[in-house]
Image (cartoon, helix red, strand yellow):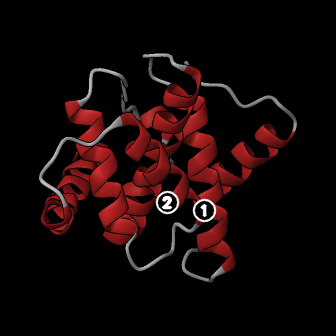
């Protein structure tokens, strides 16, 4: 649990720097429409140059908006997340946030949607693996198989 919190803290530190970039573009409140567009944009290309800035916008929205609720648990992430490169951890955590926010905004619900967050994270993992950035992670491969069979579900 401490390791996950350390990874999350590292993500937030990275995002604080990136948030400065996003803040320069607009000091205004992030609307649900913008957050939804950003979530979709991030998921469409999690390896893009501006990916960390997009994650920063989503984190800011998830913290400031009462329209979404995003929870973190060690159950939602690979056990070796703490040993990964911080950039990779940030991308996986960002994908979780993006999928979670996207589902909530599209379905007008205000409850943590871990399953949708994890499915988004699996898409980012697949892109990272295909690009050679990460090697195979057995826990995520198992989740991919469950997702393909419609059996992946988190509380």
Quarter of the image that includes the C terminus: top right
145 in relation to 49, above or below: above
In the displayed structure, 104 sits above or below 21; it is: above
| Residue at disc 1, secondary structure | helix
Q: Residue at x 20, y 32 (%)?
A: 64
Q: Are marks 2 and 1 in contact (CB under 8 Å)?
A: yes
**In the image, 113: left or right of 1?**
right
Task: Report the residue at 67% width, 56% height from top.
Answer: 138
Secondary element type, mark 2: helix
80 or 125, which is in the foreground?
Answer: 125
**Quadrant in the picture for residue 71:** top left
In this rendering, does residue 155 appear at all? yes
**Camera sees residue 2:** no
**Location of residue 22 in the rendering, given as x and y in whole percent from the top left corner:** 21, 63
Residue 132 locus on image (x, y percent)? 62, 83
The percent coordinates of residue 63 (x first, y second) are 22, 34
Q: What residue did someone put label 1 on?
A: 44
* Mark pair 2, 1: CA separation: 5 Å
Where is residue 20? Give x, y as percent: 12, 65
Residue density around tag 1, few if under 14, some if 14–19, many if 20 or more, within 10 Å: few
The residue located at (39%, 61%) in the rendering is 89
Pick whichever, 123 or 139, lies toward us.
Answer: 123
> Which residue matches tag 2?
42
């Amino acid at each position: 649990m401490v390791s996950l919190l350390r990874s999350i803290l590292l993500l937030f530190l990275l995002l604080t720097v990136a948030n400065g970039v996003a803040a320069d573009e607009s000091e205004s409140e992030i609307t649900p429409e913008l957050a939804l567009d950003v979530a979709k944009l991030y998921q469409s290309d999690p390896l893009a140059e501006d990916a960390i800035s997009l994650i920063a916008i989503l984190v800011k929205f998830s913290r400031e908006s009462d329209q979404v609720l995003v929870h973190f648990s060690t159950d939602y992430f690979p056990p070796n997340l703490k040993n990964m490169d911080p950039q990779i951890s940030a991308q996986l955590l960002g994908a979780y946030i993006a999928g979670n926010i996207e589902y909530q905004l599209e379905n007008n619900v205000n409850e943590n949607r871990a399953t949708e967050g994890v499915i988004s994270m699996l898409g980012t993992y697949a892109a990272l693996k295909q690009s050679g950035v990460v090697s195979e992670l057995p826990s995520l491969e198992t989740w991919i198989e469950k997702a393909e069979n419609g059996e992946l579900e988190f509380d």
